[in-house]
Image (cartoon, helix red, strand yellow):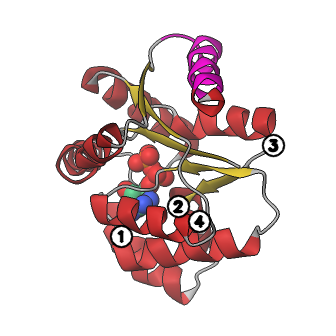
Amino acid sequence: MLNIVLFGAPGAGKGTQAAYIKVRYELVHLSTGDILRAARKSQSELGKRVAAIMDSGSLVSDEIVNELVAEQLKSNPGAKGFIFDGYPRTVAQAETLDRMLSENGKSVTVTLMLNVPNEELSRRMIKRAQEKGRTDDTPEVIASRLLVYERETMPVAAFYRSQEKLADINGLGSEGSVLDRLIEAIDGASKR
Ligand code: ADP
């Protein structure tokens, strides 16, 4: 089983690259951001609970996202693997993911860290705001999401680095050239 964690700041290109990787390796794409946005769109109880938190740029509680991921793992028993996008975002989430996978004798294969400088991240997110109208892509919320990333999510990189599962990837350049770097890292890790 190939379990890939795609890691990086908001705007690093996780969603774009996850879509390519999903097709190439026949994986299930698990984006907690997409699941939460779908919940909001359908105006479910969950959607209503998380809306204000998401619009402020803060993280939804570990309890809620861990539960969403557990449901996805359960509902895809025959999957060849998963590409996790936007999860885990805290060390507590990373520990929970390890536990959920190991209960089924599985583990994270590799964590790919997409590195993009902050100025470029802001530029991409402002462009995305114009194209997609995401409510959390305003300049103030972008700044706060970058801070939340540094404070709460960066420690997840150290968590995987200590397990020798972190691959640093340059996230600058064309979509195709970034994808080539990711593929090289995935193929290298899955041979080990
Ligand atoms: P981006 O990668 O651009 O930040 P996402 O679509 O991954 O966007 O996430 C959007 C928002 O959804 C986050 O700012 C946060 O409020 C919430 N969210 C998504 N994934 C998680 C997670 N794993 N833990 C907590 N909150 C999350």
Q: Mark 1 and mark 3 in contact? Answer it, CB < 8 Å.
A: no
Spatial CA distance of label 3 from label 4 is 20 Å
The mark that comes first in sequence, 1 or 2, is 2
Mark in front: 1 vs 3: 3
Residues shaded magenta: 173-188
Spatial CA distance of label 2 from label 3 is 19 Å
Q: Amino acid at mark 1?
A: Val
Q: Mark 1 and mark 2 in contact? Answer it, CB < 8 Å.
A: yes
Q: Element under label 2? A: helix
Q: Position of residue 5 (x, y in %)?
A: 51, 45
The mark that comes first in sequence, 1 or 4, is 4
Q: Position of residue 16 (x, y in %)?
A: 61, 34
Mark 3 = which residue?
26
Closer to the camera in the image, 71 or 61: 71
Q: Mark 2 and mark 3 in contact? Answer it, CB < 8 Å.
A: no
Ligand 1 within 8 Å, label 2 CB:
yes
Indicate whether 117 appears above or below 5. Answer: above
Mark 1 = which residue?
60
Local crowd at mark 2 within 10 Å, few (<14), some, or many (≥20)?
A: many
Ligand 1 within 8 Å, label 1 CB:
yes
Spatial CA distance of label 1 from label 4 is 12 Å
Q: Element under label 3? A: loop
Residue 135 falls in which quadrant of the image?
bottom left
Mark 4 = which residue?
35
Spatial CA distance of label 1 from label 3 is 29 Å
